[in-house]
Image (cartoon, rainbow, N blue to C red):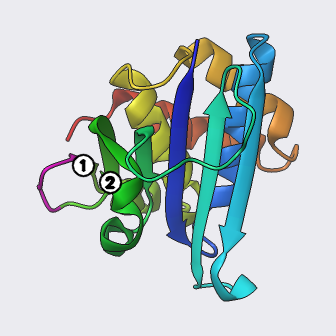
């Protein structure tokens, strides 16, 4: 199993937490995993990108045109980080606007369930439901349980489950 994933957004959108969940899911399945992240200006609201490589890789960074999957928490980051996706790569974008990608307004949906902070997990759930990731929903539930703080666990699982059931 080999998969290269980028997660792009702004500081405060849960890019780093989604990265941890994906990495933990890979570990649960016994895969090798490498991660790397870049924090734009290292502040809330700055651009953030994470690279996740699942499988036998040597370097954590994904070269331009090589990512299999992109999760974009901010549609504006398509212009900045879209070049990482391969021609056959799949884009999942947090937006209500249709385009040359798979979209879902994860922020709106997260607000409807009571917390904007789970929009990252709503989008992740959507990508898992669409079969875009290396593991099924059960593995990701375990990974969320393992990486969440106890006070956030129920909300995080609710966000993920909502994304699994939601349709564009």
Taking depth in this image into account, of 148 and 100 the one nearest to the observer is: 100
Measured along the vertical axis of the image, is residue 139 above or below residue 104? above
Answer yes or no: do the residues labelled 1 and 2 have beta carbons within 8 Å?
Answer: yes
Q: Which mark is residue 93?
A: 2
Q: Going 20% across and 41% down the picture, which residue do you hit?
A: 168
Taking depth in this image into account, of 12 and 71 the one nearest to the observer is: 71
100 inside magenta stretch: yes
Q: Position of residue 69 (x, y in %)?
A: 42, 38
How many discs appear?
2
Q: Quadrant of the N terminus?
A: top right
User: Quadrant of residue 48 in the image?
Assistant: bottom right
Mark found first going from the N terminus, 1 or 2: 2
Q: Going 34% across and 59% down the picture, which residue do you hit?
A: 82
Q: Main secondary structure of the magenta part?
A: loop
Residue 156 shows up from this direction = yes
Q: Residues within 10 Å of mark 1 (few under 14, many from 20)?
A: many
Q: Which segment is the magenta one?
A: 97-102
Q: Position of residue 21 (x, y in %)?
A: 70, 38
63 to the left or right of 78: right
């Amino acid at each position: 199993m080999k998969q290269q994933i980028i997660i792009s957004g702004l500081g405060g959108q849960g890019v780093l937490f989604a990265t941890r969940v994906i990495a933990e899911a890979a570990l649960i399945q016994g895969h090798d995993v490498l991660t790397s992240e870049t924090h734009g200006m290292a502040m809330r609201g700055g651009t953030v990108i994470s690279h996740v490589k699942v499988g036998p890789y040597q370097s954590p960074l994904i070269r331009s045109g090589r990512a299999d999957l992109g999760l974009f928490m901010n549609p504006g980051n398509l212009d900045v980080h879209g070049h990482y996706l391969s021609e056959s790569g799949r884009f999942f974008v947090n937006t209500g606007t249709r385009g040359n990608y798979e979209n879902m307004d994860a922020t709106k949906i997260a607000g409807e369930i009571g917390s904007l902070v789970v929009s990252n997990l709503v989008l992740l759930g959507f990508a898992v439901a669409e079969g875009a990731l290396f593991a099924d929903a059960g593995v990701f539930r375990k990974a969320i349980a393992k990486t969440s703080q106890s006070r956030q666990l129920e909300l995080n699982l609710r966000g993920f489950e909502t994304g699994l059931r939601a349709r564009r």
